[in-house]
Image: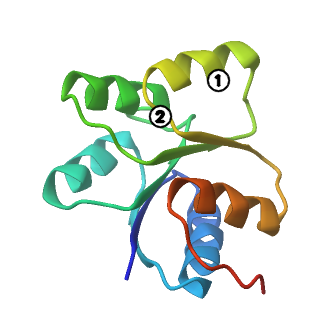
Amino acid sequence: MPIALIVEDDQSTRLLYRKILEKVQFKVYEAEDGVEGLQMLKKQKYDVIILDLHMPKMDGEQVMIVLNKRKESLPVIVVSAHLTKERILKMAKLGVKEFLQKPFEIRNFYQTVNRVYPIKVQEA
């Protein structure tokens, strides 16, 4: 069973991502901010990481900077309502594999996850 980590400060958004991922048989873990997410990344390997950009304590960009310093290449998808070309380029240089602009359609979420971790998706 593939494992996903959702790093997102908004509880209802985490719940939405969880439901979507569980429909395609992911085991899902959640972190409320970047600090908690980094702690969880030290303890376990994940097949997909869903990362918000704007969070308290430590944002998504800071998380990627830390992961870069650790020389970790991880399957990260940034999901944000605040994606600019400059931000996408910067985050891609930090190792982000895919980006998804909020709001999005669920099929786009599945397609983005599939590019990072190929799954057989039967959209609900």
Residues at marks 1 and 2 touching, judged by CB atoms closer than 8 Å: no
Residue under circle 1? 88
Give me the residue at 33% from left, 49% from top: 37
Disc on the earlier residue, 1 or 2: 2
Estimate the x, y position of residue 93 in percent, counting from the top left. Answer: 48, 18
Secondary element type, mark 1: helix
- Quadrant into which the C terminus falls: bottom right
Given residues 10 and 108, the one toward you in this image is 108
The residue drawn where x is 56% and y is 65% is 14
The quadrant holding residue 10 is bottom right
* Colour scheme employed for the rendering of this structure: rainbow
Residue bearing mark 2: 60
In this rendering, is residue 11 above or below 60?
A: below
Q: Nearer the viewer, residue 108 or 66?
A: 108
> What's under tag 1, amino acid-wise?
Ile
SS class, disc 2 = helix
Q: Which mark is residue 98?
A: none
Residue pictured at 56% horizontal, 73% vertical: 119
Quote the CA–CA distance across marks 1 and 2: 12 Å
Pointer 2: residues within 10 angstroms few (<14), some, or many (20+)? many
- Residue 39 % position (x, y): 21, 49
Report the side of 53 relative to 94 (left or right).
Answer: right
